[in-house]
Image (cartoon, rainbow, N blue to C red):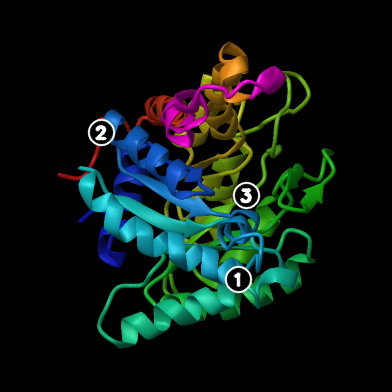
Amino acid sequence: MPIATPEVYAEMLDRAKAGKFAYPAINVTSSQTLHAALRGFAEAQSDGIIQISTGGAEFLGGQYSKDMVTGAVALAEFAHIVAAKYDITVALHTDHCPKDKLDGYVRPLLDVSAERVARGENPLFQSHMWDGSAETLADNLSIAQELLAKAHAAKIILEVEITPTGGEEDGVSHEINDELYTTVDDAIRTAEALGLGEKGRYLLAASFGNVHGVYKPGNVVLRPELLKDLQDGVSEKFGQASPFDFVFHGGSGSTAEEIATALENGVVKMNLDTDTQYAFTRPVVDHVFRNYDGVLKVDGEVGVKSTYDPRTWGKLAEAGMAKRVAEACEALRSAGKKLK
């Protein structure tokens, strides 16, 4: 069962919450990066999550039409086939989708899965993200209610981001400032609007100083202990212990201590994109520098076909990214914990 069924995905998340570990959620933009993610999970003997952002889906749709739904569906169908060769279980997820892209991305993909479920099949994706962080919390939660109902009907888990994550990802950007911290009141309003599972399961991307992209130590103040305050505040009001399944966004460059605190406080999914992008590209650059006169036809020469063959440098890129994915599994404590 390489691609998780809805029931198995729920089991994966439950195991992570109970065991205080999290799954790396790896952004992919091609069949090659998909294989790199699968390989990294398999080498770490970890289950995991593979995700496609709006920009990634547009890229996958081809530069002629740039159709996000086509790109996402095509790679998901491909994943359902090739993942069977890996002895781990993965869930397929779509990453950040702001309001102006819902009609061109998440809503059509929900319809695709709803049609599959109506035929007695499993959904194509196991979860989708609604990023309403640029909206008011009231508008954000209103849209989330609509999407959660549709997702629940299609046996899909919804991820919601209720307050801003700093930095920029696929055109959605927020300043790095004191507003990057979710309050207990924000969490209570979320629970009031979306319930605590009875209306459908959702993952919560709360903000505790997270920033997308690359940043040096000291530029960002992460407060993962804030997640415990959110859990406790909602638990006190609704009487449900540790009510949220949290997502850690902007995780590239985080310290081991910050990650450990986040895991202890309910994080079950951590997104990685920046680090894995670099891990994929770095070996390619090294190959080009080392074989400059082979990959280029310098001074009228013919070059060396074996050095500019995409398979040559592609294998190096896959290995580099897979290694970084395996390292993430170790850091998030999911290594060696694959479903039997």
| Residue situated furthest front in the rendering | 300
Q: Residues within 10 Å of mark 3 (few under 14, many from 20)?
A: many
Percent x, y of residue 163: 71, 54
- Describe the element under mark 2 as helix, strand or loop: loop
Percent x, y of residue 312: 44, 28
Q: Which residues are magenta?
A: 297-317
Percent x, y of residue 208: 67, 40
Query: Residue at 37% of width from left, 64% of height from top?
Result: 77
Relative to residue 194, is residue 222 depicted above or below?
Answer: above
Relative to residue 46, is residue 219 depicted above or below?
Answer: above
Disc nearer the start of the sequence (3/2) = 2
In the displayed structure, does residue 115 sit left or right of residue 283? left
Disc nearer the start of the sequence (1/3) = 1
Percent x, y of residue 309: 47, 32
* Three-letter residue code for mark 3: Ala
**Picture mark count:** 3
Relative to residue 300, is residue 131 depicted above or below?
Answer: below
Q: Decide whether the magenta segment is chiefly helix, strand or loop.
A: helix
* Three-letter residue code for mark 1: Tyr
Residue labelled with disc 3: 206
Q: Marks 3/2: CA distance? A: 28 Å
Disc nearer the start of the sequence (1/2) = 2
The one of 315 and 90 positioned closer to us in this rendering: 315
**Residue 300 shows in the view:** yes
The one of 311 and 305 positioned closer to us in this rendering: 305
* Whether label 1 touches label 3, CB < 8 Å: no
Q: Marks 1/3: CA distance? A: 23 Å
Query: Residue at 55% of width from left, 25% of height from top?
Result: 284
Query: Residue at 45% of width from left, 79% of height from top?
Result: 112
Residue labelled with disc 2: 45
Please give the label number shown on residue 105.
1
Mark 1 or 3, which is nearer the eye?
A: 1
